[in-house]
Amino acid sequence: MVRTVVCAKQVFDLEGLKVDPKARSLITERVERKISDFDKNALEEALRIREKHGGSVVVVTLGPPTASVAAKEALNMGADEAYVIGGVDVEQLDSRATSDILAAAIRRIGEFDLVICGDASIDMYSGQVGPRLAEKLGIPQVSHAKKVTVNGGVVTVERDLEEADETVEVPMPVLLTVTKETNEPRIPTITMIIKASKKTIKTMDAGELGAPFATSVKVLKALAPMTKRRTETVEGEPAVIAESLARQLIREGVVDG
Amino acid sequence: MTLELLGKGRELADSLGASLCALVLGAGLEPEANTFASHGADKVFLVENQALRNTLPEPFAEAIGKLASQHGPEILLIGGTRRGRDIAARAAARLETGVITDCVAMVLDEEKRSLVADRPSYGGILVSTEVCTTRPQIATVPPRAFERASPRQGQRGEIVRIDVELTPPKTRVVQVTPKEVKGVGLEDASVIVSAGRGVAKKEDLRILQELANVLGGELGCSSPLAEDLKWLPLERLVGLTGRKVKPKLYVACGISGQVQHITGMRGARTVVAINSDPEAPIFQQSDYCVKGDLYEIVPLLTEAFRKIRQGSVTS
């Protein structure tokens, strides 16, 4: 029996984003929201562990409960319970506040053996929430897990570091972070979705968790970088275009003559 | 990596009129400590402890947390490797402060004595400018973002050995297998010829490959070709979900130019776009725009380079 908590962040689907070139800002209208990619791998890993060893999978996410695509998606995939922590403006939270709130929420939910997070969210990609949460919960962390094997009270993890692959053993409770290489998340079938529709999304209020939270990192601005390019149209017959372009590129020194 | 931190750190410390300390954690690291002492660190704190042997995040964060509480640094720079990022975040949680990760540029607000850092967000679609309002301000820096510190003639920092009591880690490292270095290395290519949906068949990539060969470059592609059609492996994918490249020359062939692709090629010095759709957004992000058929232009371009080179050899 392994009791697992999965932390999932709701994000914009980056593939659908466009940039307003004048304002240099993101156009997010009509862009779908979803569970951040690696968090979905985290949920998939938790579900596989439950299928093998029994136990439970509880998903925690932050955001306005009424709009929680993430919680719904998690239940559809097969999570036993999904909690949405509201009462806070998620746009204003940094990794510090997020992990403080999550730590308090996980304590409130109860005993656990494993916490699994994505390595990083696809939007901010800061990768802090996992390690911070582990520190707050007072448990070890193993990041970049490629393969996870539970054996009794011990988890064996094969992990991917830049220069080496590392295998570690760690007693539960432990926090793991996973990437897209860890597994292929399941796509809910209609039967799964119907089954999930009977489950209700549970809510918590960040202010009532009895733990203060504060932010440290402030975003002053976030702008699309605009590289100034010459946008010079090369005109003429194809053979002329090719030759004048080749000569120009050699003159510029970007290719060897 | 640490030398890059020392290079940037020295600059920040000088602007603030502060001292620069290097923190060396591990076992048997005296040679490293000596190097840092001769490369601009005013002080090198050397902490040797068996708990630090395997570079696990818990004892490292504990050591950094304890030393930072004791010495009160204003800024802590940590190498943005996978291990480094884990350690930085865990240490920050202990110190109840923030981390700005992946800083690619850093300046100081000297009045507030605060670090103002740029980092990519939304997969590089945006550059986010951030500050840390609590102390210490922790920043992780990706490899190769800043110049390495050079040795300082006649100046030598003091090496201070410190004992820190650390909790033995619960994690046991069973095996470490160094990785084999892979071939492609799109990030290091000086020329990239990239293919998009304008290429009709997989076999036609040969035309682009020939141009790449003539230029001593590598073949790249946009996401449909690697992710949907799977004509090329993921390590050749340029863009949001692939590589961020910085060649001297980037030739985009039949690529429409969605922001997700532009994000990967923004670092290129010169961009050539070849596309038969004169309205393709790629042209807004290119230096030289060829509004024509890549099947016609690319082979002619390959030929033109060959000819010019032959000419320059004979003349």
Image (cartoon, coloured by chain):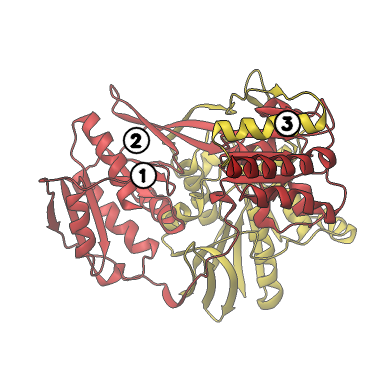
| Along the viewing direction, whichever of A84 and B230 lies nearer the viewer | B230
Element carrying mark 1? loop
Crowding around mark 2 (Cα neighbors within 10 Å: few <14, some 14 to 19, many 20+) is some
- Distance from disc 2 to disc 1, alpha carbons, whole Å, reads 8 Å
Tell me which chain the residue with mark 2 is part of.
Answer: B
In the displayed orientation, state which residue is furthest to the bottom.
A152
The quadrant in which residue A80 appears is bottom right
**Distance between the Cα atoms at labels 2 and 3?**
42 Å
Mark nearer the N terminus (2 vs 1): 1
The image position of residue A142, as x and y in percent, is 49, 65
Which x, y percent locates residue A41? 66, 59
* Chain of the residue under the numbered disc 3 shown in the image: B
- Dot 1 corresponds to which residue? B96
Q: Look at chain A in the picture and name its colour.
A: yellow
Name the residue type under label 2. Thr
Find numbered disc 3 in the image and state the secondary structure of the residue it sits on: helix
Question: Which of A184/A100 is in front?
Answer: A184
In this picture, residue B255 sits left or right of residue A249: right
For label 3, the residue is B282
Q: Which mark is residue B134?
A: 2
Q: Are marks 2 and 1 in contact (CB under 8 Å)?
A: yes
The amino acid beneath tag 1 is Glu
Sequence-wise, the earlier of marks 1 and 3 is: 1
Where, by quadrant of the figure, is residue A5 drawn? bottom right
